[in-house]
Image: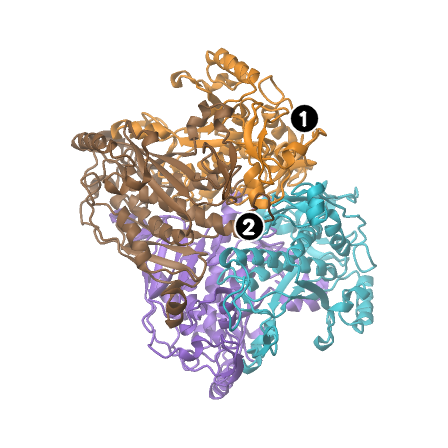
Chain colours: A purple, B cyan, C brown, D orange
Amino acid sequence: MSHNTFGHLFRVTTWGESHGPALGCVVDGCPPGVPLTEADIQPWLDRRRPGQGKFVTQRQEPDAVRILSGVFQDERTTAKFGGQVTTGTPISLIIENTDQRSRDYSEIATSFRPGHADYPYFAKYGVRDYRGGGRSSARETAARVAAGAIARKLLPGVTIRGAVVQIGPHAVDPGRIDFSVTGDNPFWAPDPEIVPVWERHLEQVRKAGSSTGAVVAVEATGVPAGWGAPLYGKLDAELAAALMSINAAKGVEIGAGFAAAALSGEENADEMRMGNEGPLFLSNKAGGVLGGISTGQPVTARVAFKPTSSILTPRRSLDEAGREIELRTKGRHDPCVGIRAVPVVEAMVACVLADALLRHRAQTGGGAHVLGENPKS
Amino acid sequence: MSHNTFGHLFRVTTWGESHGPALGCVVDGCPPGVPLTEADIQPWLDRRRPGQGKFVTQRQEPDAVRILSGVFQDERTTAKFGGQVTTGTPISLIIENTDQRSRDYSEIATSFRPGHADYPYFAKYGVRDYRGGGRSSARETAARVAAGAIARKLLPGVTIRGAVVQIGPHAVDPGRIDFSVTGDNPFWAPDPEIVPVWERHLEQVRKAGSSTGAVVAVEATGVPAGWGAPLYGKLDAELAAALMSINAAKGVEIGAGFAAAALSGEENADEMRMGNEGPLFLSNKAGGVLGGISTGQPVTARVAFKPTSSILTPRRSLDEAGREIELRTKGRHDPCVGIRAVPVVEAMVACVLADALLRHRAQTGGGAHVLGENPKS
Amino acid sequence: MSHNTFGHLFRVTTWGESHGPALGCVVDGCPPGVPLTEADIQPWLDRRRPGQGKFVTQRQEPDAVRILSGVFQDERTTAKFGGQVTTGTPISLIIENTDQRSRDYSEIATSFRPGHADYPYFAKYGVRDYRGGGRSSARETAARVAAGAIARKLLPGVTIRGAVVQIGPHAVDPGRIDFSVTGDNPFWAPDPEIVPVWERHLEQVRKAGSSTGAVVAVEATGVPAGWGAPLYGKLDAELAAALMSINAAKGVEIGAGFAAAALSGEENADEMRMGNEGPLFLSNKAGGVLGGISTGQPVTARVAFKPTSSILTPRRSLDEAGREIELRTKGRHDPCVGIRAVPVVEAMVACVLADALLRHRAQTGGGAHVLGENPKS
Amino acid sequence: MSHNTFGHLFRVTTWGESHGPALGCVVDGCPPGVPLTEADIQPWLDRRRPGQGKFVTQRQEPDAVRILSGVFQDERTTAKFGGQVTTGTPISLIIENTDQRSRDYSEIATSFRPGHADYPYFAKYGVRDYRGGGRSSARETAARVAAGAIARKLLPGVTIRGAVVQIGPHAVDPGRIDFSVTGDNPFWAPDPEIVPVWERHLEQVRKAGSSTGAVVAVEATGVPAGWGAPLYGKLDAELAAALMSINAAKGVEIGAGFAAAALSGEENADEMRMGNEGPLFLSNKAGGVLGGISTGQPVTARVAFKPTSSILTPRRSLDEAGREIELRTKGRHDPCVGIRAVPVVEAMVACVLADALLRHRAQTGGGAHVLGENPKS
């Protein structure tokens, strides 16, 4: 991952600031002949869009995506693929910023909001676009979600689902996680019982002008064995980088994660039996990855998000002149950025998997070696 | 990070299998004029070397490193630099494998040890070097440690120190962590009081033919503000990838990590005051990284390691023919691979930081903007 | 260079097709604090723009560039830098396509124009945007020129000048090349005497519905010694790739180029004397590059361009069904694409040099070692 | 291509200096299951080896290659593949330097040999290994040839053949080029009639203590349509970079190359007819590449090599103190380095094609779309 590009073969380059005219990305390396229109991308952006509840930021923007290149339609693509398809050339996506309210940035223009990227951006670059967080705004994640929508098109048998599994101190009981119910509540909660608990907690947090952290879990089912590339292109290392690059992420786990530290070898080593369609694992402590390569089990990860840094409580800080100040962050913001991160986490997993698919195909021709047989491709 | 190379400008390519004739790495992009001999690298390898206690594997090898290229010495380098120095060309390091005991691998040649990379390597590649784990053996980490020793030479003001902070269920009290005492015990424990606890635990584990997980903490002090590059070259994303790529790693945290999920915004946003030598932070929940860029605080991370997969208890598994088998892993091994990981974790942090230094210098000329002043370089 | 991105640290990703809504590029890795507005880029695009004479294509578009990200202006940037500056974040540039005439593409939709990329695009991708050449149209070079304008801002002491030195069989006398007069004629000719010769030749070519090739020379003065990186990042190798990637390029020479094959060692080895400001070379057969690193002499290269493939003479070809056909290419086109390539060649050289500057600074801190002194930075 | 690595998916990292203990390379990304032993590589090194005639350097070394990693053999690989095969992990190759004669380097230690890389290496790095040219020695090309031998194993249907087509002013008649006879003479001449001409010329050059340049042509037959990736990963751009990175290369042409500048559009646009096995081109001015993608025709290129810079005639130069000196280069050397470049040119083409094969397979699944049919894979 280099500066503003991630991926090796399915490569995503994002650009844009919170209050510039637009943001977007260029997706390069996409295979040709993949049906793709804005209608394939927009629903994923709509899921990510803020302003959908009182617990997320009130910024109201349609986040309408436009495809500027890399697709084509004529009567023959319609006959063969059903409409517009990718051509194998770079796909440029753009989302206009329509809600950059005119406001007074004089206070934060020269001050560093604690917990924000303000100070290190100043230290590194000297100059920074402080309006709405500039490049470090979570608005950039719209480009990730758009790219992820394209990645999903390359992964027809793979299902990627995220859920919030902890808000503040309140965690979902792991035994009650059901990814199919996350759409039924405004928190992407995989357990209806936690919803009122989180509602109360977030109401308190909101009233206090405070914020709270969260943990997001993600699961990709249908990933075949063999994706990933040891040792520095390990699938879990790629996931770790992709997920840790999301705004406010502070930790990444694969499978059992930190809990693995307290396990015994017997508990941790997922046993194998033979199923009708290939190996069956009797547990999935590995999170679907061993030695950096997928095992065919669900790929599972968890990401920790810190509390939103923008809070109403005054905090001690500094300004560019080195003066000691007190600062409270005004304006719209989420009390819990982790909630909005769910579609972003899913998108990053999709992009990593699409990249892994292409890399696997490059080195091996695709497919996996099957027990008791010669390799199939 | 691509397959067997990591780093963008300080680039490390490793090669070698557990039971091949040798292993090694090529370090490319190192600045010229850096004093470097085998004596700068060997001590770090000696720290990593197994066979130093009853709780680590009994494989006995000198792990003597040789530099094959990229350095030069004549009377002028001696006069100017005190001896042999790097020339800016690729540095090739080699470590002979001298303890590849001849033994019978017939059992594991066609079987998949649960928790090991055996099955996914088979699924991906069809053919694999199963002797001692082949490429997926922890022996490869010697190359990482050697590369890390070179990286440290580029970071004169930076101190990188790791410690084991949890073995099995027994964690060090965070308030008692003292990195300066890790060398006084065989566990890299940062608190002498935990040592007898871990001894008892590991003795039980060893007798039971079992294994146990661990958590390693690492801290880099002296990292100036400004290193790292948003958004996909974030310092924390690079650290996450590098650390997750270590054998048996299952989780990575930066700063408060997963604990941040339960914090309030007030607790999490590190406040700032002005010190004599620049900004002072009153806490370090961020782990020294905000928005993907270093803040000048210590960079802190934690890595979770799963229990060693090789255990004496028979486990259910499969072989390449698809037959259901029971397997117990014989031979030498560590009951807790996390212990040996400490020098590896340090080395990966060193490599990431050296790379970040070069990338920062490329884009900005180096240095950081200082409060109340123009930029210094 | 990967698919649609070139450069290592000064990275340019281009996108867009001839008849899509727009084209553009993302420039990543640009240093912060560089004054930059559209007015810095537009003049270079205006130089490249077709429709400026009867010997270049009549497509009429303003090619107005917009900067969508990566720059910022407030009263402080105005005070310090004189206006808007780069922030170190990715710079997204967009140029609308305004002259995509509605026309009938039915003939070329399924046919392969000889000399064009039609057939290999079909063979590789199956689907292709045939309107105006799609992705393989020379229109893409507008993005290169825009990126090159930014690169030039990073190279204040460097002057990059291109010229057409051969059209068809008519070459400029090397002894008469004067880069300062190229703006005085519509051919970028560095010698006024060749202008009427080329005019007559092109008039014949145009009347015959034919086309002709050309050679473009380029020279970068002010490049200090030390840029480039052996062995596979050699400055001349990077230039060769960048220049060969331009549409219709078929050859690249550095310095004496192919003529070096006929030279003796005495003639080829540029002798050195000491000048007031450093080493002086008594000739420049090397083209300013030895061992892949700049010598401080002008960097010189030449690029051969094939004749425009679109000609009015019917040519034997095939269609997608495998039928043998005869095809003549109708519509607007240049009789000599090499003429329009001059600003593109300059831009590619600028991008390669900006990248080399950043890479050199990364590994060495910048500057060059000076004869008789310690290194200056 | 970054510093000492080239290739995207078939990646070669070389290391080593002329007078260090060894040189070698790491080949990463090679598919698994490819039969490979030293016997597959050594013959190609033997072709490259100097000391085989009076017109090439008298350095006498066996250049014996050893494979240190990335291959495996047991009874099952023997049964299935016939012996040792690649495993998909990095292949480390090493060649010992056995003929680093002890000699006096005091003269060139601080002086810059004209035409050599001495001065720019000094300017960039300050310190350099001047013994035998250090890193810039043509000895490094042994690693390229070894890597190329592996690349050839991935290209079973492709034949890559090089030839010297010009030495000094004496060029082979293009109509008489027959690649099948290059092994019959010490010059890789594709026409027996030129042999005595070159013998006389080189004898004169050698007696005069001078040197001479050369042009090498290379042809790859059997490359299917569809390899390469526009726009910056164009097959011809990759070839240009790879070939220009060879020591002493000063120019690269694809197909008609610089001669294309003097052609008319009619002459240049290769017409197509339908053959029994697919499209037939009636000429190959394109050199097998259109729009950066292979056409299925032979890929043809030419590389210009400058005269050997080491000559016995004293030349004016400088030393590190800035003093003006006269320098003649003593010791063994070739009067014409271009001759030895033939196996190196072939190897670089093989590596580029192997990389293109893997990249093509990644994005498209492999294969090519066929006229009148659906895609085959």
Task: Say which amino acid is labelled 2.
Answer: Ser
Question: Do the residues at discs 2 and 1 belong to one chain?
Answer: no
Q: Secondary structure at mark 1?
A: loop
Q: How many marks?
A: 2
Query: Which residue in the protein does label 1 denote?
Result: D61
The residue lying furthest to the left in this view is C207
Please indicate, yes or no, whether residue D101 appears anywhere in the rendered image: yes
Q: Which numbered dot is residue B2? A: 2
Please indicate, yes or no, whether residue B17 appears anywhere in the rendered image: no
Q: In terms of depth relative to the viewer, which is nearer, C203 or D104?
A: D104
Residue A10 image offset from top left, x and y in percent: 45, 52
Using the image, name the chain to which the residue with label 2 belongs: B
Closer to the camera: disc 2 or disc 1?
Answer: 1
Q: Crowding at label 2, few (<14), some or many (≥20) Cα neighbours within 10 Å?
A: many
Q: Determine whether, in the image, residue A155 is placed left or right of residue D205.
A: left
Between the C-alphas of marks 2 and 1, the distance is 34 Å
